[in-house]
Image (cartoon, rainbow, N blue to C red):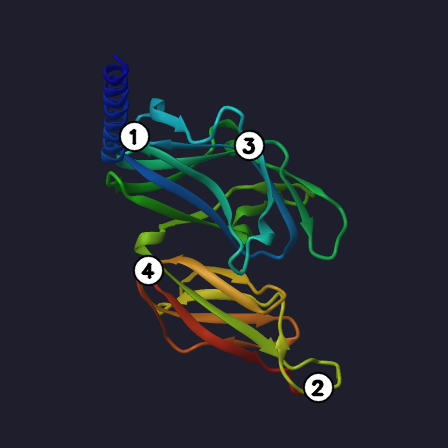
Amino acid sequence: MKNNVLMVAILLFAILGFQSCSDETEKLEKTSRLQLKLVDAPGDYQEVNVEIIDVLYNSTEDEGGWTSLTPEDFTPIEVDLTELIAGNELLLSDVIIPSGMLKQIRLVLGDNNTLVIEGEAEVIDLDTPSAQQSGLKLKINTELIPGYSYTFILDWDVQKSIVKAGNSGKYNLKPVIRVNADVNSGSIFGQVVAKPIMSNGTNEPIPLEGAVVRVITMSGDDITGTETDDNGDFIIQGLDPGDYKIKIEHNNYIGYESDIINVFVGKATDAGTIELLVPVF
């Protein structure tokens, strides 16, 4: 009798285990992993604080087809965009969704969006009328294959996104975001150094923080950019494959323009260590 009970139990566990494996396989056959990462192209601001209250996606062109990527207990994300430089990024979403065509994503902003201008202490409210009502739509138009993971880089251009409202002293936030799939793009990284302007006992170059690094196409179009961190490092992600140049500027040093830099899909191109020079008067 005991042996019969044992055999039934083993058989039951085997069936449940098979069912579990079958369910997992079926899930993989119908779903894909979606990651959204936010990075920043720099602007002339000390802080740009935004509140993201929801992230949605749409597999159709139908306005009724939006689905939230955030859980029910989601806490709004408050982030200073100026900190998303030199490889720092904000993971907005990492979820499993049904495979198929992904048409659009949407960022919905809250009311707590502020600006601090470089060299000033005042915190200025940013008006975001369109984003508050319906959210910022971003075109994706990518087919998600079952069982695969997809990462999209959302490059928020702060300088283009903030608009001063005449002489009123008010500022509007009209987000300008460039989107590219990590799987279809490459990146450029490097380090910026300079010899100290004031003598510090050594003539060796030191890492240069706060240098603005811009990516320029061969036709002269300004694509995106970032700033160097306290180690002088920078990385610019989500670039279409092709030929580019980088331009580097810092208030105290002579500007720099590189030779042609080749960007390849899935690869990080090393721009090397770049030394900026002090102007000679």
Left or right: where 175 falls relative to 240: right
Rendered image: mark on residue 21: none
CB atoms at circles 3 and 2 under 8 Å apart? no
In the picture of the structure, the residue carrying the numbered disc 2 is 202
Q: Which mark's residue is nearer the viewer, 4 or 1?
A: 4
Q: Which mark's residue is nearer the viewer, 1 or 3?
A: 1
In space, the residues marked 1 and 3 are separated at their CA atoms by: 23 Å
Q: Which mark's residue is nearer the viewer, 4 or 3?
A: 4
In the picture of the structure, the residue carrying the numbered disc 1 is 61
Q: Residue at x 36, y 35 (%)?
A: 96
In space, the residues marked 4 and 3 are separated at their CA atoms by: 37 Å
Residue type of the residue flagged with mark 3: Pro
Q: Position of residue 101 (x, y in %)?
A: 26, 36
What SS does tag 3 mark?
helix
Q: Residue at x 49, y 44 (%)?
A: 91
In the picture of the structure, the residue carrying the numbered disc 3 is 129
Residue type of the residue flagged with mark 2: Thr
In the picture of the structure, the residue carrying the numbered disc 4 is 266
Residue type of the residue flagged with mark 1: Glu
When asked about the image quadrant of residue 24, the answer is: top left
Figure check: 22 above or below 84: above
